[in-house]
Image (spheres, coloured by chain):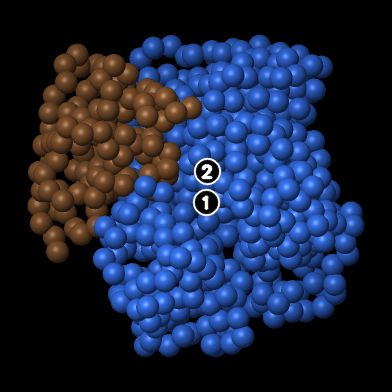
Amino acid sequence: MEDNLILTTDVFVVGSEGAGATAAMEASKMGMRVLVATKGPEIGRSGSTVNLDGDMSCDSRSINEILKLPGSDPADNKEIFFEDIVKGGKFLNDQRLVEILVEGAPTAAQELVKWGVEFKNVYKASGHRYPRGLAFPGSRLAPLLRRMFHKSGAKLLPYTLINNLIVRDGTCVGCIGLDIATGRTVIIRAKAVILATGGGQAVYPVTTSPQELTGDGQAMAFRAGAKLIHMEFPQFIPGVFLEPPAIRGVLVPFTLSGAGFINGWLLNNRGERYMQRWDPVRMEHSTRDILSVAMASEIEEGRGSPNGGIYVSLSHLPKNLIENLGNILPRSWYTEYGGLRMGDYVPDLFSTAIEACPGCHYFNGGVKIGTDCDTDVPGLFAAGEVTGGVQGANRLSGNSFAEIFVFGKRAGASAARYSKQARLVDVEPGEVNEFKDKILEPLIREGTENPFKLRKDLQSLAIKKAGVIRNKGTLIEALETLREIKAQMTQIGVTNRSPAYNREWICSLELENMASILEFVIRGSLAREESRGSLYRRDFPRTDNDNWLKVVTVEKKGQEISLDHQPIIQSKISPPKGIYEYGYL
Amino acid sequence: MERDISVKIKRFDSTQKASSTEEYIVPLRDGMSILNVLNWIAENQDPSLAFYSSCRTGKCKGCLLRANGKVKMSCTELVAGDLYLEPVDEQTLIKDLVCSGSVDKNEASSE
């Protein structure tokens, strides 16, 4: 095998999409040398940004003033937007970060327009009191991002998996990973590192997100000594396809029911509209949290479909109404998704019920950041979904689209400022031998375990015992089973030792991170004895503002995971006291 | 309904100079994409097979390949019968079906 690849830069960004590319462009604009690692071949070929179904939230008044879009409402303002976000986050948001989001969104929207983004519609999504969703699909955003990035002077390292940060005297001085295409180790010396790796949705078997979201950023930040927060809050969307395999994870069933565009019914295997028992007033238009918990309960309690879902049915709609739907909604909303043609998989949407289940959609938790996107480790910055705090215990629609651009830029600027006074530290290959051995281990070890099988085992454990509905008993069982899976992971052997683009090897390295993320989710959930936002504990089903308005932190102490509780950070709004039924705070 | 199909894949590894073609027999279920077939092969028959994919829904266009001679996205292409799969661009080939740029020429020209 060839030697290490050793690269030197001012600012190094891990992750290449909305947050990462924006951070890189900003740091580059400030005169820094910038390198960006992506696990994919190019900008826009991996990650969640290209996958966005498209609305960026911004207060409606600013939309009205700046973009003058029809449908925007000047009665809205930044304060109301702020309140909605904090209420949607169930008061766990770091309010200083929410202020930054709200203040930064109009500028970010204007900048996107300069890139060539055409915002034509603004719509009101659930949880927002005004129409704030600037519609633009990720598939059209990604090519613009790609073009702007390549003009910026920042350089891309394609097919690069960074999996450990190099910390010297408590300061981040670089990182190390795998050049996937050749199988060489990559060692980066940098004055500052920015994490922009997205969430950890791949921990769950059914997800709307791409499969490479394996929580690399959160896991390596933890290993480097940074605090993580809100890890107990993975968010589920109530209604993605389970079958057939090609459309697993596609959220059209939600579009057809809960999202409210077409009033599909949610049925259990007895044909009952089970939402009557959960939210008789709002029924299928209840909140995503309640819909997900209700859906998971029906499935768990044996009232699900043969493949383990519930049914979304449109068969109550009369034929002539269906024929007219194309006049009131873009037909593509229910006949296509991305490049998938629904008719290939669901021959008759209007007469046959489709099977759907909750799908993991977002990670509200992640690396704890300050207002400069700084982490607990000097020299290490983070932006976007890899962080926690902006969205609190749950995220409103459109807010991650806004977050990646507002905080990406901020992280880039902060890292650039930091780099100007930071010293480049020599990192000798010998110094990082431990990390290097860890990277090479799965490739050279004589092992018998198959990483693809273990990945499936881990995902199946995650949804069964740390999924939508959690309780102490199953969470503790989950920890035990996870321990067994981790033991098996030490026996992984690849069947082919060719180092170039070795998927078994990549999977083995990602699996380490996935196991860490799942452990954080489980331990975080055990550390919160109530239900709030996207966490539902069956054994503590209420939201308790008298005792649980606090942040669960996860950090490494010695070789152990240490959990703690910290006060919430309030700048403007004080949460109400009292105990609430789940979903009614 | 399940039936067996033949999937021939043109394979390349820089350590062996020439390409070779390998055949797999895959049990095809209704509603499987080429990507599902590739994942099935990797998980059940040959973990060494190299291919790239990300979004699974035809948005990122990272999974382009040639299927029976035509350029397709593996994630959105429903499989109906036997397949012959090749990399999308021999010039930038890294391994098996993985190419370095994964450039979508149509998209590139419209930018």
Is A366 displayed left or right of A493 in the figure?
right
Residue B87 in view of the camera: yes
The image position of residue A523, as x and y in percent, is 61, 58
User: Eyeballing the image, is A581 above or below A234?
Assistant: below
Chain on which label 2 sits = A
Q: Quadrant of the N terminus of chain A?
A: top left
Question: What's the residue at 69%, 50% (across, down)?
Answer: A69
Q: Is residue A79 above or below residue A287?
A: above
Q: Which residue is drawn at the image coordinates 62% and 27% (left, top)?
A: A13
Three-letter code for the amino acid on which mark 2 is drawn: Gly
Left or right of A497 in this view: B57: right
Q: Which residue is mark 1?
A: A53
Q: Residues within 10 Å of mark 1 (few under 14, many from 20)?
A: some
Quarter of the rendering containing residue B30: bottom left
Q: Secondary structure at mark 2?
A: helix
Colour applied to chain A:
blue
Task: State the residue at coordinates (55%, 31%).
Answer: A144
Q: Are marks 1 and 2 in contact (CB under 8 Å)?
A: yes
Name the disc covering residue A138, or none: 2
Q: Nearer the viewer, residue A88 or A370?
A: A88
What's the residue type where badge 1 is placed?
Answer: Asp
Foreground pick, A267 / A334: A334
Residue A281: percent from the left, percent from the top? Answer: 61, 85
On whether disc 1 and disc 2 are found on a single subunit, the reply is: yes
Chain B, chosen colour in render: brown
